[in-house]
């Protein structure tokens, strides 16, 4: 009825008549988002084409003068992409992301499947498994750092029980990187577990009944029913997980920035240090544009791949 | 539908861009003030002024500050001081950001090295022509030089220190040795099982520069080019390597926490730690604390040379005249003998005001006396932002030398190259 009425009016005013109130309600949130996300996001692109650093900060602060040009931006990008540091750090970031997300997802699904069964004290297990999520991240990291202490740390003491020699966790690159991965894996499991648990609970039990009648084993049920049906739920979670892990500043920085400067940085730490320790704002902005593009390309490809596969299955 | 949505988005975006380009004022007023002949600390505030004072102090120091602020406000009924506490790094970043927005503090209580970025960015006011000679004269020698860059003064020191000293446990050793040879000898005798003669934060550059200075090295030349590739660096690297692998008087993986725990357990005779740690050790059960200068190196005849720093008041640039006067009056009060005595009594800080050094706590208390003595052998840490590049250049090589993964002779060139690269990137 409404649609027929609207046809002879201006479509825009018609649209506002219909949805105006909703948009008015959304406006405050939209303004905030524009101010704190959209505007800084585009401003970052502008910064990326400038050579702003500590010594060029004075005119910028006083008169708002920011020298930008296509050339300067290109110089920034060339400088980043042509340095050998970038590629090493990039490779390390990929290794870091893959190990972490793979562990998050597999442990997450594993615990979710366990929790989804009938067993006693399920509430207690669930609470315990949620704890990493409930403690502020930086406190968790500092506690882990204490546990990785060479002489007094719980980890080395525990290994000592089995006659394993003390490991210099926080002062060698390999040790620091492993320690950071262990910490981050521990931190990331609850999120994937919750998502997987939600997905499991929405799987129709009749599938399992049918499988039982066909005489399928537990493993077969997981492989042919659980995992395929979890995929649509896990895909967005994995995309998020990869982005979070790729851009995870806290863990490595707080674990080892004071002891392993520059030795196990991932890209985001490199950017953070360029901007806030060395005041290279233009360079750091260009660097974050590159990180953004990497993640954008990856995200689009991954989503495409997953939806193609889904179609293929259908 | 999509089109109108985009329309709204573009509208909001362009609006927000407009908002970002707000104006700045209050510049002209400041310039008039400089024309008056009297220095700002000798003039009076004629309007009501509220000072925003941002600091990075520990809780114990904050209560001293509050007591002092109360006294100041009694004396200057026109001026109100609003104190805000934040963590050191936040203080730097927030001040920078807030200054751009025009809502920053009037003054900060910063570590000395905030002067570097603040002056380069034009956030800190140049003080030479604003304050009287009498005010300048009250500080210990060299203190104001340490806060100047390219001949301009940017900060007024509040307290001195943050320097490393030799601490010893009198339960284990009677007195502090005069030279490193003596120390090594004593330490060798004491090192046994999990008790060590010496422990310090061995892989941290701030500790290493003590040795570097003792071998006659320094991190910058006059034009702020790094000078790490020299004999002093190699000797210092060899020396710290020997402490661990030849003399075997320091524990493996000797870091801050380990040093701290060993000392508190009474399992380290000597440690090298800063003035911030005295309070805790003085109260510790297993420690009878002694504080002394870091010994002399027999090879050079020079004493260990820690970098010294302190806390300084930095006034923001471009304040209106009345607010400038109020800020300087506040700084004048905080560096007066009365206020400085309170920092000594409440917090055991070494004062910046030279007249406060006659305080009985400094002359008679052996901990403070030892700390004051070490201050003489220290050298002000360069306040330039490039110092960060030096720390980051030293750390990886030092780390590898201490884990016997790098020949000390190869370290200097590596460190120099890394420092040069980073500094070039910053400019």
Image: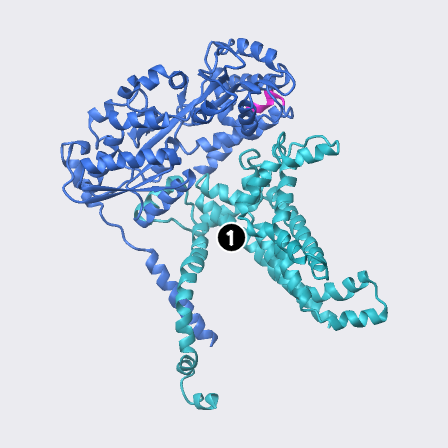
Chain colours: A cyan, B blue
Determine if residue B336 is in view: no
Residue B324 is left or right of residue B65, and the answer is left
B370, B132: nearer the viewer: B370
User: In the picture shown, does residue B8 fall above or below A278?
Assistant: below
Q: Which residue corresponds to mark 1?
A: A289
Q: Residues within 10 Å of mark 1 (few under 14, many from 20)?
A: some
User: In the picture shown, does residue B395 fall above or below A54?
Assistant: above
Q: Which image quadrant for residue B22?
A: bottom left
Residue A165 is left or right of residue B108, and the answer is right
Q: Position of residue B406 (x, y in %)?
A: 63, 25
At mark 1, the secondary structure is helix
**Magenta residue span:** B407-412
Chain ID at mark 1: A
A301, B190: nearer the viewer: B190
Residue at x 42%, y 48% (from the top left corner) = A50
Q: Position of residue B176 (x, y in %)?
A: 48, 12
Determine if residue B108 is in view: yes
User: In the picture shown, does residue B215 fall above or below A229?
Assistant: above
Q: Position of residue A45 (x, y in %)?
A: 46, 54
Toward the right, the furthest residue is: A215
């Amino acid at each position: 009825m409404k649609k027929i009425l609207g046809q002879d009016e201006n479509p825009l005013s018609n649209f506002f008549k219909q949805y105006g109130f909703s948009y008015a309600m959304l406006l405050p949130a939209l303004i905030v988002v524009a101010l704190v996300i959209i505007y800084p996001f585009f401003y970052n692109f502008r910064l990326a084409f400038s050579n702003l650093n500590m010594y060029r900060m004075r005119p910028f602060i006083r008169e708002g003068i920011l020298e930008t040009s296509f050339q300067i931006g290109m110089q920034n990008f060339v400088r980043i992409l042509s340095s050998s540091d970038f590629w090493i750090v990039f490779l390390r970031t990929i290794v870091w992301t893959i190990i972490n997300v793979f562990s998050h997802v597999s442990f997450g699904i594993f615990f979710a499947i366990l929790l989804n069964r009938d067993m006693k004290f399920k509430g207690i297990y669930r609470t315990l498994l949620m704890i990493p999520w409930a403690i502020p991240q930086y406190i968790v990291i500092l506690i882990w750092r204490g546990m990785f202490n060479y002489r007094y740390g719980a980890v080395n003491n525990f290994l000592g029980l089995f006659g394993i020699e003390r490991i210099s966790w926080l002062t060698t690159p390999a040790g620091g990187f492993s320690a950071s991965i262990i910490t981050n894996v521990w931190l990331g499991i609850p999120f994937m577990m919750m998502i997987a648990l939600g997905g499991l609970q929405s799987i129709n039990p009749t599938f399992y009944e049918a499988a039982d009648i066909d005489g399928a084993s537990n493993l077969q049920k997981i492989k042919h029913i659980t995992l395929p049906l979890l995929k649509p739920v896990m895909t967005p979670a994995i995309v998020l997980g990869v982005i979070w892990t790729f851009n995870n500043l806290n863990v490595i920085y707080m674990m080892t920035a004071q002891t392993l400067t520059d030795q196990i940085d991932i890209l985001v730490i490199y950017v953070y240090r360029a901007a806030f320790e060395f005041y290279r704002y233009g360079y750091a902005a260009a660097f974050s544009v590159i990180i953004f593009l990497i993640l954008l390309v990856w995200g689009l490809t991954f989503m495409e791949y997953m939806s193609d596969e889904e179609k293929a299955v259908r | 539908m999509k089109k109108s949505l985009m329309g709204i988005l573009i509208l909001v975006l362009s609006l927000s861009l407009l908002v970002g380009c707000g104006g700045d004022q209050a510049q002209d007023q400041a310039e008039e003030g400089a024309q008056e002949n009297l220095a700002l600390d000798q003039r009076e505030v004629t309007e009501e002024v509220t000072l925003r004072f941002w600091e990075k102090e520990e809780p114990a120091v904050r209560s001293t500050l509050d007591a002092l602020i109360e006294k100041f406000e009694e004396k200057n009924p026109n001026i109100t001081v609003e104190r805000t506490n934040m963590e050191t790094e936040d203080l730097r970043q927030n001040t920078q950001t807030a200054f751009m927005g025009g809502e920053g503090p009037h003054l900060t209580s910063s570590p000395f090295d905030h002067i570097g970025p603040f002056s380069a960015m034009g956030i800190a006011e140049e003080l030479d022509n604003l304050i009287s000679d009498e005010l300048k004269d009250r500080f210990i020698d060299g203190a104001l030089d340490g806060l100047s860059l390219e001949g301009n003064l940017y900060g007024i020191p509040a307290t001195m220190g943050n320097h490393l000293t030799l601490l010893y446990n009198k339960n284990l050793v009677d007195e502090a040795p005069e030279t490193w040879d003596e120390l090594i000898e004593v330490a060798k005798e004491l090192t046994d099982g999990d008790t060590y003669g010496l422990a310090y934060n061995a892989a941290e550059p701030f500790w290493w520069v003590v040795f570097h200075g003792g071998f006659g090295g320094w991190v910058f030349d006059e034009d702020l080019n790094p000078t790490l590739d020299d004999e002093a660096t190699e000797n210092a690297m060899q020396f710290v390597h020997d402490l661990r692998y030849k003399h075997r008087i320091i524990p493996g993986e000797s870091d801050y926490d380990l040093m701290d725990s060993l000392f508190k357990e009474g399992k380290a005779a000597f440690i090298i730690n800063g003035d911030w740690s005295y309070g805790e050790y003085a109260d510790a059960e297993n420690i009878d604390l002694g504080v002394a200068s870091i010994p002399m190196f027999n090879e050079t005849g020079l004493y260990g040379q820690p970098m010294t720093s302190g806390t300084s008041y930095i006034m923001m640039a471009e304040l209106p005249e009345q607010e400038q006067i109020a800020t300087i009056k506040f700084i004048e009060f905080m560096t007066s003998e009365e206020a400085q005595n309170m920092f000594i009594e409440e917090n055991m800080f070494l004062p910046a005001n030279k007249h406060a050094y006659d305080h009985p706590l400094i002359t008679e208390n052996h901990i403070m006396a030892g700390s004051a003595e070490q201050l003489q052998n220290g050298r002000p840490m360069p306040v330039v932002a490039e110092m960060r590049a030096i720390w980051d250049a030293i750390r990886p090589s030092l780390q590898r030398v201490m884990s016997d993964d790098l020949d000390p002779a190869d370290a200097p060139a590596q460190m120099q190259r890394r420092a040069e690269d980073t500094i070039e990137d910053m400019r």
